[in-house]
Image: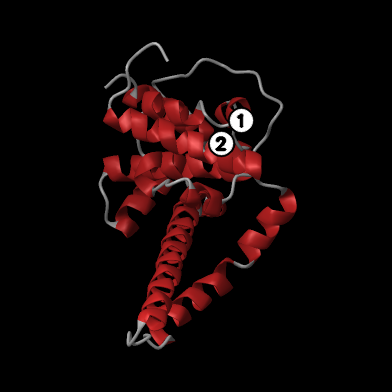
Amino acid sequence: MKEKLNSAQMLLFKKGKKLRDILLASNDEHLVTSELSKTSAIFNALAELSMAEKITVVDEKSAMDRINQWKKQELCCESLVIAAESFNLLHLASLVQIYDDLSMLAERLEIKNTKSWVISFMRSKLNIDQKAEQRNRLGCDRLRKLFNDGITPTQLAQAGCRKCDFFVKQKYYDIFLSQIPAYQSITSSQPDERISEIMSNQDFTMPERKSDVVFKLSLSEEFRDLREKFKGS
């Protein structure tokens, strides 16, 4: 990179690089097994931490056993953190479905300005301001694109990603994406038609990119505008 990265940019760069390494080292069978066993792994870790009897140190052997027990419990703690963060990311991404459901509801109710109604409804029910609502949409759209590209919540959590990483300005997020093998398809996705109706008539536009990848649930049009607003500041 030609420009020197600041601390926040460097952190995103490192997370992107770690995610790339995880993706390159993974295979489909491992991914399926990992995602399906996530819940059971959480219960196993909780059981180890809460129910395992602490080894009493009385001699050298028991001291070594206690240290090994502590190391095992440390791994359990790390597993819990990764599992919790992966569910946290999945929870944020699930907002895409809610926006889609609300847009369909607006159609059934024959509401004229679907976009304004959906956004107003979300802000009202979540009791958040305009900036927070935009941030949520930006984050859930970015995550949905990653998931649709085959990247799992667990892999993102293992790379150290947190929800706040998906709220950053576009020029920061591009640094993260630049390290991912599927970068081109992730950044050039096309929006779902229903969602596009909510996100029409914007004041800002992004340059068109060629793509043959279509994501089922995407808020791309709106987020292209949000990315422009967040650029360079």
Q: Decide: few, some or many residues near mark 2? Use Cα within 10 Å; few <14, some 14-19, many ≥20.
A: many
Q: Can residue 138 be seen in this view?
A: yes
Check the image and report above or below for 199 versus 204: below
Residue 83 at x, y = what percent?
48, 62
Q: Extreme right residue here?
A: 29
Residue 57 coordinates in the image, percent (x, y): 33, 84
| Residue 3 falls left or right of residue 208 | left
Q: Mark 2 points at which residue?
A: 20
Residue 222's spot in the image, x, y percent? 46, 32
Q: Which colour scheme is used?
A: secondary structure
Q: The N terminus lies in which quarter of the figure?
A: top left
Of the pair 162 and 133, the residue shown nearer to us: 162
In the picture, residue 130 is in which quadrant? top left
Horizontal side of residue 26 vs 218, given as left or right: right
Res. 216 visible in picture? no
Describe residue 192's horizontal placement relative to residue 139 as left or right: right
* Residue name at image x 47 percent, y 82 percent: 47
Q: Mark 1 points at which residue?
A: 181
Q: Residue at x 59, y 45 (%)?
A: 147
Quadrant of image for the C terminus: top left
Which residue sits at x=46%, y=58%? 82
Secondary structure under the numbered disc 2 in the rendered image: helix
**Amino acid at circle 1:** Pro
Farthest-out residue, top? 2
Give the camera-side residue of 39 and 218: 39
Q: Name the amino acid type tagged 2.
A: Arg
* Distance (Cα) linking label 2 and label 1: 7 Å
Asked if 141 appears above or below 185 in the picture, the reply is below
